[in-house]
Amino acid sequence: MLTIDIGTMRNLLLILCAIALSTAELQEDTQPRKFPDGFLFGSATSAYQIEGAWNVDGKSESIWDHITHRIPCVLSNCDTGDVAANSYYLYKRDVEMMRELGLDFYRFSISWTRILPTGFPDKINEAGKNYYNNLIDEMLKYNITPMVTLYHGDLPQKLQQIGGWTNPEVSNWFSDYARVAFELFGDRVKYWFTINEPKETCNQDFATGFKDLSGIADYLCAKHVLVAHGKAYEIYNNEFRASQNGNVGIVLSAMWYEPESDKDIEAAEDAAMFEWGQFIHPIFSETGDFPNIMKERIANRSAEQGFPSSRLPKFSPEEVALVKGSADFCGLNHYYTFITYRNESINGLYESPSYHDDMNVITYTPNDWKNTESASTNVPWGFYKLLTKIRNDYGNPPTYITENGFDSMADGIVDDNRVSYYKSYLNAMLDAISEGSDIRLYTAWSLMDNFEWGTGYKSKYGLYEVNYTSGKFERVPRKSAYFYRNVLKTRVLDINFEPDMSVPICEEN
Ligand code: NOJ
């Protein structure tokens, strides 16, 4: 017979209440809520996920070109980004979609290997430069602000062969590339994101090629990503800020870790510090450097495991100073909330050494948060708690929500689940703003369906559906596009708004 003690029962009830509360808030009498004046709305994509043209016009191979061409294939359905959503050729249609939605800005990424085929600034690829100039100019023609990510997963394969993000020289390779981008596009681009999701960049075996080196390679990568970011920020300050006057920051992926019970508060805090604290702390805390819990835990475990020094590399005092404060804003990608706990069942659960073994927590998604058509869960209170924690623990930095969105395995354009997700997450963000969080912009991921890394084209995040089978890559607005369009038009979140999909979205302009 299953027995549940009173404490566990209380905690389960607390979790259920929190869930019920967050949905009830939306379903009942939520009045239309206004967004702050000057608040910006946009949408995002990244180069490898949409451009295609992987080897066209002088572009060289990136790590994702390399991974997806492995035989036998390693990804879902043997998908590749060779053609993706074909945006290299369809960028004008992409800008048209931005106009249909009424976007203030569009966040896209530059493919390093399209601009610098050798990985180094010895030779700039004219065709690559022209492509991004055309895209930027097309957006500016319609008053859509370009926001540019310099690195979104697609490291030059040539650099990977010499260690990629684990080679300390990578901070120079990256910042040299950043300088080229500032020089080429900084007259028109005023928002720069150096590196997208360092945690994912460093911890995904199949992207880094460092399988079985967790607990070593991922920490080297983390340090080098931070130093690379710091150097790019310094270059912008020293060489470009006076003439270009833009904003430079980094984009962190941050989940919310909810303790399963009061005794798991420390476990949840550890999870947050190991996941996003490892990047936010060095940049936004008063002291800089990795969070103490990481430094202590990894040093102790490394000693127990017989390593002569900590597996977590040290920053020099100069590096701490370079990285600390190196951002004009905090960019956040938020998707998931997990319940988190730690008990004896953790012993032997993870390989040792490894990042997860060091973090030493167990996380899960309760069954009633899951649904069959999507890996996403609708837990807006997790988003609210995350934003509140960042406000309280990191001095309320200007915060950009650089990604948030809902994936679906289902075909079709009536995406009610995605609409509810956007409603509840925008509502949660407004709650945080009303309590003082300095959130300046929101970015829906994604403008259109695209290559979703390990799950290929099966997983769809688009406001626009992309037809991959016709050979024409038509983009068709989903219900969520109509909903988002209305938010942008009215600058109000009206959860009772029902889009009328019988009206072509272009006619509403
Ligand atoms: C964050 C990543 O930046 C993006 O590339 C990805 O598609 C989304 N998460 C959804 O998984």
Image (cartoon, grey):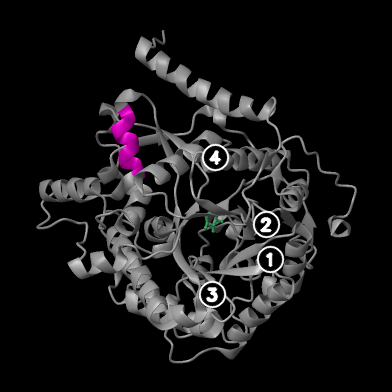
Secondary structure of the residue carrying numbered label 3: loop
Q: Which image quadrant: the C terminus?
A: bottom right
The earlier-in-sequence mark between 2 and 1 is 1
The residue beneath circle 3 is 111
- Return the residue at label 2: 449
Q: Are marks 2 and 1 in contact (CB under 8 Å)?
A: yes
Amino acid type assigned to the residue bearing label 4 in the image: Ser
User: Badge 3: how crowded within 10 Å, few (<14), some, or many (20+)?
Assistant: many
State how far apart marks 4 and 2 are (Cα). Answer: 32 Å
Q: What residue range appears in magenta?
A: 264-272
- Marks 1 and 4, how far apart in space? 38 Å
Ligand 1 within 8 A of label 2's CB? no
**301 sits left or right of 270 in the view:** left
Number of the label disc, if any, that sits on residue 434: 4
Q: Which residue is mark 1?
A: 85
Q: Distance of mark 2 from mark 3, alpha carbons?
A: 19 Å
Q: Earlier in the sequence, mark 1 or mark 4?
A: 1
Instruction: Give the left or right position of residue 462, taking residue 290 as reference.
Output: right
Report the magenta stretch's main SS. Answer: helix
